[in-house]
Image (tube, grey):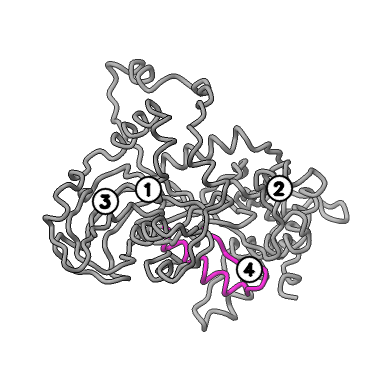
Amino acid sequence: MATEILMPALSPTMEEGTLAKWLVKEGDTVSAGDLLAEIETDKATMEFEAVDEGVVGKILVAEGTEGVKVNTPIAVMLDEGESAADISSAPAKAEAPAAKQAEAEAEAEAAPQAASAAKPAPAAPKSGDGARIFASPLARRIAADKGIDLAGITGSGPHGRIVKADVEGAKAGTAPAAAATEAAAPKSAAPAAAAPAGPSSDAVVAMYQGRAYEEVKLDGMRKTIAARLTEAKQTVPHFYLRREIRLDALMKFRAELNKQLEPRGVKLSVNDFIIKACALALQAVPDANAVWAGDKVLRLKPSDVAVAVAIEGGLFTPVLKDAEMKSLSALSAEMKDLAKRARDRKLAPQEYQGGTFAISNLGMFGIENFDAVINPPHGAILAVGAGLKKPVVGKDGELTVATVMSVTLSVDHRVIDGALGAELLTQIVENLENPMVMLA
């Protein structure tokens, strides 16, 4: 029986993507693990693998199609012995999946009784806690026919995807009552739309009639950045803590280390020391090593520190995991690798998602100080300015010159209270002003 290949969710937050390139053509025979297509998410271009063997019978979504919703059919796979004639009734090649999705949703709203009476489709099964379950279309169909709950099956396919072999030997069972109730219940009325944050697109364009301008189309990354930062500023109760850090001891220590590391081709940056200082501070103040999880706070044991990397058209925040355990040279090498692949948009989702704390360093651009926006669900982000020569008062009251760097800690007040945030920032400052302690 012909099987639909659905647009995959290549990250937990992916809702739609661009089918950038097909790596197969109609009539090709593929095996599990073979590459089918390149798909652009909001952050990266990723390869999509086949999870079952078969023949590509029909391609439904053309290369370059944008806004393809997750779980939209993009191709049809034929089983052994089938031919293209067996899928003559398959839907025509999709040209505007977003529009078709909207049309389908409108039809569902118009006939809620029919929708509730229909058998729930297994296209996007959910586990009991609402998380998406990744499974091949064939595995979903077999599970539906046998009454198997996919939430209780561990997938053996690529990236943990559930495939045919995983469900063939599983015992039939009843799907969780909550899921059945959710599938059967008619869709509730949507809440009233919030008032727009500013003038409409047409109103803005009208303001500039007669003026020369270039219209720049928003790509997926820019749309995601706009949505997430708007949400962050509207829903996260930010507060800000500011300190100045004297860098003279660190600059001297860094120069000595770099001289010793030169034969190994290692050159440490100030940012490497900042990453290490923040990672150790999170260990010293463990209550601040936390994220907001809706109805709970999660306190992490390791220090997973995200670092903002600017790329053309947006930014990534790759995460250095277990940063407190790594040497400065290891952090430096890992950060260089992550930054390079971020600029090439080659990072995997697990490399830029997660973490509890972030660093945004604009000092290299000459910015003295700024306030960074928290990247949910992080508990805090450190904004780092440039190190500048400034007159300061020494310990004995004498006036002297020192290299001073301004930092601002943006804190989510739901996760970290004022005193706790101050304790965390003080620990970061002490680590940077006494860099030798970071090697102890």
* Of residues 57 and 231, the one drawn nearer to the viewer in this rendering: 57
Q: Is residue 54 left or right of residue 355?
A: left
Q: Amino acid at mark 4?
A: Asp
Q: Is-magenta flag for residue 336?
A: yes
Give the main secondary structure of the magenta stretch: helix
* Of residues 292 and 431, the one drawn nearer to the viewer in this rendering: 292
Asked where in the image residue 46 lies, by quadrant, the reply is: bottom left
Tell me the quarter of the image containing the N terminus. bottom left
Residue position for label 3: 74
Residue position for label 1: 70
- Residue stretch rendered in magenta on the structure: 318-342
Q: Position of residue 97 (x, y in %)?
A: 28, 40
Q: Is residue 125 left or right of residue 33?
A: right
Q: Are marks 1 and 2 in contact (CB under 8 Å)?
A: no
Q: Is residue 31 left or right of residue 402?
A: left
Mark 3–mark 2 distance (CA, rounded to whole Å): 38 Å
Q: Position of residue 353 (x, y in %)?
A: 53, 56
Q: Position of residue 313 (x, y in %)?
A: 39, 45
**Can you tell which mark lies on residue 322?**
4
Q: Position of residue 200 (x, y in %)?
A: 41, 20
Q: Dot 2: within a 10 Å radius of its alpha carbon, few (fewer than 14), some, or many (20 or more) residues?
A: few
Q: Earlier in the sequence, mark 4 or mark 2?
A: 2
> Residue drawn 66% across and 73% down?
325
Q: Is-magenta flag for residue 366?
A: no
The image shows residue 20, relative to residue 104, as above or below, that is below
Extreme residue toward the right, this view: 396
Mark 4–mark 3 distance (CA, rounded to whole Å): 39 Å
Which element is circle 3 on?
A: strand
Residue position for label 2: 296
Q: Amino acid at mark 1?
A: Val
Mark 4–mark 2 distance (CA, rounded to whole Å): 23 Å
Q: Are marks 4 and 2 in contact (CB under 8 Å)?
A: no
